[in-house]
Amino acid sequence: MKDNFNQIGKSFPIQDAALKVTGAMIYTADIKHPRGLHAKMLFSPHAHARVISVDTSEAEALPGVLVVTHTHNTPQVAFNSQKKFIGHKALEDEYLFPPIVRYVGDRVAAVAAETVEIAEEAVKLIKVEYEVLPAVFTIDEAMKPGAPDINGNHNLQFKMESNTGDADEAFKNSYKVYEGTYRFPAIHHAMMENHVVSASYEPDGLLTVWAPDQNSIAHKIITSDIFNIPLQMIKSITPALGGGFGAKTDYNNIGVPVLLSMRAGRPVTLGYNRSETIVGTCTRQGAKATVKIGVDKEGNIMAQAMDMITNTGSYATCGGPIILGAMSAKYYKMLKCPNMKFKGASIYTNTPSGGAMRGYGSPQLFGAICAQYNEIAKDLNMDITKFYEKNLVGPDDIEQRSKKSLGNARPKDAMQKGMEMFDWNNKPLNEVRENGRYLYGKGMSVACHGNGVFGVGRDMTAATLRLNEDGTALLNVCSHEMGSGAIISLKQIVAEILGLEVDDVRSIHGNTDVAGWSNGESASRGLFVEGGAAYKVALQMKQRLTKYAAEYLRVKEDTLIFGNKEISTDQINCPPVKYVDLISFVHDKHQEDFIETCTYASVALPGSYGAHFAEVLVDTKTGEVKILDYVAVHDVGRAINPMILEGQLHGGIQQGIGYALCEDITFDENGKVTSDSFSTYHILHANEMPKIKTGFIEEGEYGGPYGAKSIGEAAIVPVASAVLNAVSNAIGKPVQQYPAKPERVLSLLKK
Amino acid sequence: MELVSFIVNDKKVELAVERNWTLLKVLREKLDLTGAKPGCEAGDCGACKVLLDGKAVNSCTTNIMKVQDRTVTTVEGLSKGTELHPIQSAFIEAGAVQCGYCTPGMVITAKSLLDQNPHPTEQEIRDGLDNNLCRCTGYVKIVEAIQLATKKLEES
């Protein structure tokens, strides 16, 4: 079928770009609230301690201080920062101010004052008596018998197992069995906008919260739980997000300014600086993954077993069932192998809590698996792409565990296209250059992520679409534009269906007062599910237009053609009717408005696959890794907006290279973060990035609008393993500990 | 408090400040120019960049007393009313804007760079962005935007 679209498949910049380039875009920290107060937090200096007493007298005596809150004067309601909906079974072990602090950076007290400076001064005047408790910082230490016990269950937060076939038997029948353990540090999201929240509790009981929030609906629920405020009295505004990458799906400290505002009777803003954001909010989970793989002589995977231990840090948040469930779901989406098992455990440590981050477990999962594949292929003297070719799933293959279709899974197509773009077959696996000073290597990996949470739980988005009198449209979806371009893609979908231009559609988003329910900006559901809602509501509107256009033009409905904000017909002597005239006709004759509402529930959870290729040069003298060339091809179903897709992929690659080479949150011996700035936590700069070539496979996916599926999270998943496989191939040794900082590379070279 | 006067976006301002305030704080809190963003407040990320006498500086590490009698241009000062500066248009057209939080600083650095070197090589652009961090774009389309801006500036 020939595609003949006007809006789909075309590049449009993000809809608020003009505001962002002029400085006119208003982010949460840009808002000045009348009578607004400023808050600062006192963070725990201890990794594990009971808060015996808090003396606030000097702080409260400071002129300009209005409220000081701490564990002994606040509601002790336990919550989970990743609770998604009422009834969601998420272990609740966090408090606004916990009676026992669990990491250096935990919340001890907060001050609301007339200025930031006064609040900072007051925080210094708070005197806290602690009973310091023994602490534990790594999952290895935390799992040892007799380790300091954080949760009263020997630091085990959750464990789970899943399997398909009989892996144990298949290992016995394998030609060779390989096993490797890989370690991943906690990392920082490094969205450019730090965490900031404003709250205003008004005398009529209405609470308004402004925050860069990826899931304002869920966070309303948590606020309601803590403060016993009914939901109609909570309004969440998401002015804009200066990046999120999962960090802002976490409830985090939202309740603190709410509490302060309720006490002070004035709006309160709590803004974190970079250090506070790194130290005092969530991270990507550190992990230790042991993968065991059995193969036959031809390189077919006979059995695969994963033992994944994640570091949930100080609190459960999305440890436990959420991230391990997410990992195990992706685990079964890649391989034809019928014998697989997954074992996972989530372990507490006295470090910042592990939260959601782009890829949500997949970078750790595939980081280990794809590294092991690289080692196996080398051992079998087989090109890694041939190894993948034998084992990867294809279109309409059955997922071995659920026995359901994987949809239009195209990892092999992505790999083939990537190989061509990279010229894979004509490049050596490795070579020594400049008399041994440099070691060259190429590497690649194929991995995947999902599209929402269909089958796991509710996965729906409500949408409302209105037509103005002139035929332009207002789309209202509870979306939180993170900069990922979901909204512009939704506008394209609506415009395509209704024969409008993209600029004819304006989106109303980021306000829970006017939006229906949605799962929020997580799980790569922005386009696949929210886009599905836009598609459905626009079709409903088209039906309404069709009915009245047929009446107006006195023709049959199936003769109508939509385009250019008018409806024409193939009947002769029948001029088209402009939307403006049709709407006026309907307003007049039927006294009926053009407003449609729907709830779209997702119907599938396909994988979004990506194949990434890297070539690197390792400096044997300094241990530095330079990436010479990079290619990434993704199976996206359909490119609704190619420019946005490329941008998502580019950003994912920047983050993934950082994960591979330079990013980790480091601690001193007392559990204090030592990488709490951008000078100590290094993210890649413009002149450290390689050239990137991108490509897309567009073969359509069932359940996605126009066959489209996600890119946001999938973009980051294969990156680090592609880079580190190239490094491993260059130096002839596997990299089993992220990141491959120069000192680590040098020590591997010395081995 | 001390009095300090300087020119910001072609307008002379005089205001009372504390000696330890930064230019960023004054712009955002006293002059309602919130285009410059706090991202690190340590001079690492460049989201707060403004032009000081035509050169891009981090306003978060610029003491307000050093600004006396000098000329500041913020991202708000680049466009004339609703008419965008060619660099701003280039950022939009190239798709260089995602979350947008780094964008004002990127646009300012691009202005400073292109004023000094109207025809930079790609490497010169990348080096010129060394003090501007972005977490969304991988810098690819930002570099392309600056290349597009050079063409637009030539034509204008």
Image (spheres, coloured by chain):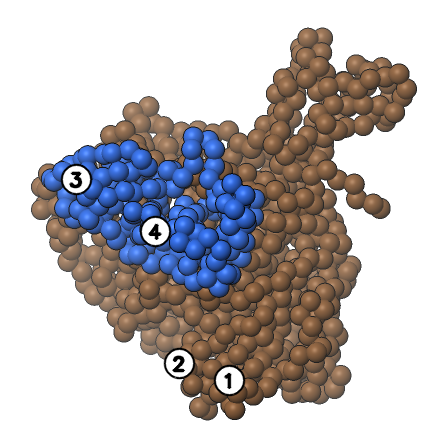
Which secondary structure, mark 3?
A: strand
Mark 2 neighbour density, 10 Å: few (under 14) some (14–19) many (20 or more): few
Q: Tag 2 or tag 1, which sits nearer the N-term?
A: 1
In this rendering, position of residue A534 left or right of residue A656: right
What residue would you read off at disc 2?
A743
Which secondary structure, mark 4?
A: strand
Q: Is residue A253 visible?
A: no
Q: In this rendering, do the residues under marks 2 and 3 share a single chain?
A: no
Q: Amino acid at mark 4?
A: Ala
Colour-to-chain, brown: A
Quadrant for residue A459, please give it.
Answer: top right
Which of discs 4 and 2 lies nearer the camera? The answer is: 4
Which of discs 4 and 1 lies nearer the camera? The answer is: 4
Residue A650 x/y as whole percent? 55, 58
Q: Which residue is at a point 46% across and 53% down the rendered structure image?
A: B118
What residue would you read off at disc 1?
A438
Q: Is residue A611 visible?
A: yes
Q: Give the numbered dot on residue A635.
A: none
What residue would you read off at disc 3?
B4
Q: Amino acid at mark 2?
A: Glu
**Are the residues at dot 4 and dot 2 in contact (C-beta closer than 8 Å)?**
no
Measured in 3D between alpha carbons, the distance from the residue under mark 2 to the one under mark 3, in whole angstroms, is 48 Å
In this rendering, position of residue A490 left or right of residue A296: left
What residue would you read off at disc 4?
B56
Q: Amino acid at mark 1?
A: Tyr
Which of discs 2 and 3 lies nearer the camera? The answer is: 3
**Does residue A365 lie above or below A250 as drawn?**
below
In depth, the one of A145 and A123 nearer the eye is A123
